[in-house]
Image (spheres, helix red, strand yellow):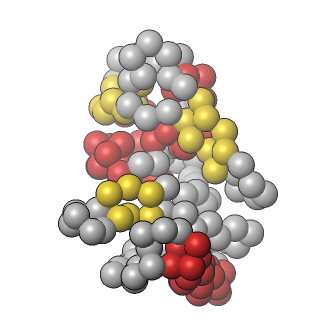
Amino acid sequence: MLSTGPAEDEVLINMTRVQGLDATKVEDLTKAEYEGKKQVLMVADFLKEWIPGFEQVFISSVGAQIGIRESSIIEGKYILQKEDVIMALKFDDVIARSEYQIDIHAPSGKGMEIGWVKDNGVFDVPYCCLVPKKITNLLVAGRCMFASHEALAATRLTPSAMATG
């Protein structure tokens, strides 16, 4: 993804992809950091050599750490499902609303799966998705909320994560 940056001569680029590592293992996270930075340098080199207008390109900053889309989760009272998102289900205990389609970057291999949300594209995030099944006095939020792989692909973004927090 390429979008305009804060300054007139800046662009923001989001196109690296590190796969096949376990986000719960520190050794794999270290490998992922290295691989991600290596990919950033490769993208910059490609742009400089092949894309008109990028002849003077340089990297001004990168993320502080690699972004993890999904790893292990504990069991919740309710797990938001793909159908809940797609059908824009309404919940009595809604604590946030999200307006983003299901956007699955294949965990292995290449490709994406998009799932559009019906009607106006807004779906509820219920409170019960933040409540663990077996642990008392704890709530989870953001990417830790209880959602299927598909539903998490619509709730993992910063606005939804912030709304649940």
Residue at 40% across, 82% down = 56
Examine the rendered structure and indicate whether residue 38 appears above or below residue 94: below
Q: Nearer the viewer, residue 152 or 54?
A: 54
Residue 34 figure quarter: bottom right
Residue 18, x across and y down, in percent: 64, 70
Query: 150 left or right of 165?
Result: right
Examine the rendered structure and indicate whether residue 54 appears above or below residue 35: above
Residue 42 figure quarter: bottom right
Residue 115, x across and y down, in percent: 59, 30
Residue at 36% across, 43% down = 160
Examine the rendered structure and indicate whether residue 94 appears above or below residue 2: above
Residue sitting farthest toward the right? 109
Examine the rendered structure and indicate whether residue 143 appears above or below residue 66: above
Residue at 30% across, 68% down = 10
Residue at 58% across, 46% down = 75
- Residue 114 visible from this viewpoint: yes
Q: Nearer the viewer, residue 101 or 125?
A: 101
Residue 64 figure quarter: bottom left
- Residue 65 visible from this viewpoint: no
Residue sitting farthest toward the left? 7
Residue 149, x across and y down, in percent: 63, 43
